[in-house]
Amino acid sequence: MAAVEKAYWPGTGLLTGIPRRDRRGCYYEAYIPDPLCDREFLIGGEEAADVSDAEVAVSGLDRESVRLADTEALARLLLRAESISSSKIEGLEVGARRLLRADIAIENGEDPHDITASEVLDNIEATTRAIALIKDDAQITVPMLLEVHRTLLKGTSLADIAGGLRTAQNWIGGSDHNPCSADYIPPPPAHVEPLMEDLCRFCNMDHLPTVAQAAIAHAQFESIHPFADGNGRVGRALIHLVFRRRGLTKEVTPPVSLILATRANDYVRGLQATRYLGPPDTLDARRGLNLWLGTFASACTRAVTDAEAFETRIDRLQEQWRERVGPLRSDSLIYRLMAKLPGSPLITTTSVMRLLDCSRPTALQAVTRLQSAGVLHATRPDAKRNQIYEARELIDLFTSFERQLASPSGNTHTDPPARQVPARLSRR
């Protein structure tokens, strides 16, 4: 049965430079969720329909995205969106152009001089590593999640706690100094490892619809809050681990976290609703579960709808590019480069050589042709070497995509973004 464990926080009476209310001691209650593996989950009729619709949508996006000339390009952009969104929920905000410039600087062996962008790039790497770990019915394990966490925090000021379960009590909300006014207090450290082992066993079962399993796993992970920091990002990566293990997604990562960020109040309310007390078959426990399942499933469906619209816009933009460049063979190097741009909106001559396996003169010739057609733009016109070119329209399209996902209705003209996003693009 789910329960709370009461404990006392001793506080400190010393004059340590913090307010008196943060120095005081208090009794607090840490929540201990039920294990998942032996529970029976009764999904309501409407929520079951929502889950089914979400599964059809997510699998359809993954299957039908092969219409693009380069499926990997769309998958990379959606993965980038998902990774950025995971950071946005936790306060790390960075625009697409800034992130891409930091990315290519690192690729060129340069210091991007942008700590925030570097942290988001680490988040992308962690999400990529998480998804790559699931292949051919691989099992989700605690060491796998520790590896994702290690990747996420490496190179940061929190590197010393990377890849390890927490050994101290943590809490969400309230004061940074004590749990007395916290919004939520996860289980004490002694409960973390067994709960995580149970969670991973649950993730490797196949008795529930995939979307429902991912939703429950994510909520349980957030309730356990097994790390001293980085829980939100690893928890959202876990969603895609479940999707990939069950075969719901193979190529495309739907940006579910961007929708959850837009519906932050519903997201938090849904998680809180899963934290019942007593046995799991009570009416309150079932209602809470179904509230969360409906919230999560609808976020998945909305993410797919917006991703499909984004895919269509990319396709349309590439058609416009081909019209501007003029008649060429469909297998020409220039056409191949245009097909690669959605996955690499910022390029250098060196990166083109790698993308297309061609010589430097050939790469430079292709870049020059696309630059003259207005497809590519030099970001440093006066640079004599290491010039960086950007597909400006594509980056602008990506910014519009982020704004759309931040709008509760998906229409930023009538329904402004509900969270901070890049500014609306000015007409050139």
Image (cartoon, rainbow, N blue to C red):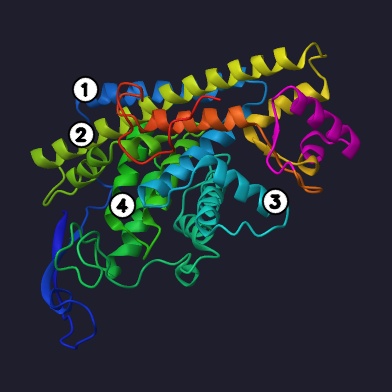
Q: Earlier in the sequence, mark 2 or mark 1?
A: 1
Say which quarter of the image contains residue 188: bottom left
SS at mark 4 in the image: helix
Tell me how far mark 3 sits from mark 1, CA to CA. 48 Å
Question: Any mark on residue 283, and which?
Answer: none
Q: Is residue 354 one of those drawn in magenta?
A: yes
Tell me how far mark 2 sits from mark 3, CA to CA. 45 Å
- Determine the main secondary structure of the stretch shown in magenta: helix
- The residue beneath circle 3 is 107
User: 329 and 415: which one is in front?
Assistant: 415
- Count of labels shown? 4
Tell me how far mark 4 sits from mark 1, CA to CA. 25 Å
x, y percentage for residue 286?
Answer: 15, 37
* Residue drawn where x is 53% and y is 59% of the image: 115
- The residue beneath circle 4 is 222
Question: Any mark on residue 290, and which?
Answer: 2
* Residue drawn where x is 42% and y is 52% of the image: 92
SS at mark 3 in the image: helix
